[in-house]
Amino acid sequence: MAQHPNRQVVLRRRPTGLLQPGDTELASHPAPQPVDGEALVRTTYVGVDAAVRTWLDDRPGYLPPVQPGEVVRAAGVGEVVESRCAAYQVGDVVATLCGFQEYVLIRDDLFTTPVPRGADQLSMISVYCGTGATAYFGMMDIGKPQPGQTVVVSAAAGATGSLAGQIAKVAGARVIGIAGGPPKCRAVIEDFGFDGCIDYRAGELGNALKQHCPRGVDVYFDNVGGPILDAVLGRLAPHARVVLCGVISSYLSGHHPGPANYVNLLSKTALMQGFNTLDKWDRFDEAFAALKRWEQQGQLVHREHVFSGIESCVDALNGMLTGANIGKAVVKIAEPTPSPQPTAASRGAALGGCPSSGDT
Ligand SMILES: NC(=O)c1ccc[n+]([C@@H]2O[C@H](COP(=O)([O-])OP(=O)(O)OC[C@H]3O[C@@H](n4cnc5c(N)ncnc54)[C@H](OP(=O)(O)O)[C@@H]3O)[C@@H](O)[C@H]2O)c1
């Protein structure tokens, strides 16, 4: 087999804050040849998730930190181009932890999930992967929005927040987003169908929350932490649920300021709970089936901010961290092969990975 050149974004030194020139290197090596039990995948799309930045820090997490000299880790979608593994045939589409690189070796393990061949690979990475599952489980299992209740979602124009808010709308709640800047706030209302949106960069958040949530906040889906979390805690309704999804406001500094208004959890008999989507692994099918149904019924839309080419991975990551994206930030690494017919049934959801609902 001819060896494909494989360009990859390699970590050279640990970044402080946003990635700077010299923190990573765009290296090129021949793609590895699969040995028995392995297959070679050509990456088509790679997701630019907040987790990618956290994996570059030397801190323990649910996966080990990326080490200098290793490819920057990220979840994506790609196509099998060579196989010496019974589980995969050439042409199969898979979701896997491909990293920021053009080719990756896979095995028949939990890191890789087959995707139906005819599926739209872009929506696979943007909805029917960790992102959709995170929005679904955070909102449904912890937020539990009820008809007429007020739900607030931060980073509302982003990948997870835009889906989480729409899920709360399906449940009959009144949903208010928090996002940075007028174009994002417009998208939150006009594209994603929220009832209102607060521009947190425009001024004092406490007053805006009072105006938009006169009866208090019944559910807060928090993607950001920091001062926004504190402000929303100050506005909780009795028996509120606060979903701790992420703390993107402190991923660059590594400093997590404590919320003074946490005492409201006591006075409002409220619940604040964190979660890791991967713990819900065995229920990914349930999440994807519901998301698919809502999408088909016109109750759920998704948007992607697509960066182009392996060279744009670092800019895409810095861009996502500073709010460049509306919807899911994705890098298109290569053109997917058009496939007329959905085929493969898949077998379950993978780490950082994707779906099994055969009809997606
Ligand atoms: N718990 C889990 O299992 C799990 C799984 C996946 C993701 N997550 C979390 O979900 C959150 C969203 O991740 P995502 O991948 O969907 O990213 P995303 O929302 O698509 O993009 C990140 C957004 O965060 C906002 N942001 C950045 N810095 C901010 C700051 N200082 N204050 C307020 N907003 C800020 C930006 O929007 P603005 O322009 O509006 O500021 C940016 O567009 C992250 O915290 C991530 O860690 C959790």
Image: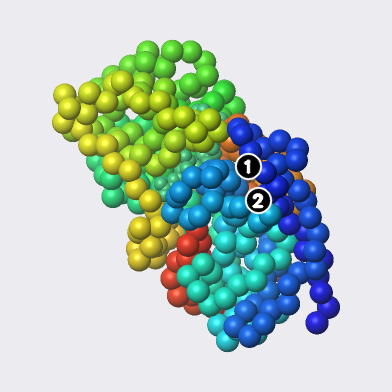
Q: Is residue 121 left or right of residue 153?
A: right
Name above or below for residue 167 compared with residue 18.
below
Which secondary structure lies at badge 2? loop
Q: Residue at x 71, y 36 (%)?
A: 20
In the rendering, which numbered label is found on residue 14?
1
- Marks 2,1: beta carbons within 8 A: yes
Q: Residue at x 56, y 65 (%)?
A: 95
Name above or below for residue 68 compared with residue 89.
above
**Badge 1 density bin: few <14, some 14–19, many ≥20, Cα 10 Å:** some
Which secondary structure lies at badge 1? loop
The residue at which mark 2 appears reads as 68
On the image, which quarter does residue 35 sit in? bottom right
Name above or below for residue 329 compared with residue 280.
above
**Badge 2 density bin: few <14, some 14–19, many ≥20, Cα 10 Å:** some
Coordinates of residue 14 in the picture (x, y in percent): 63, 42
Coordinates of residue 40 in the picture (x, y in percent): 68, 74
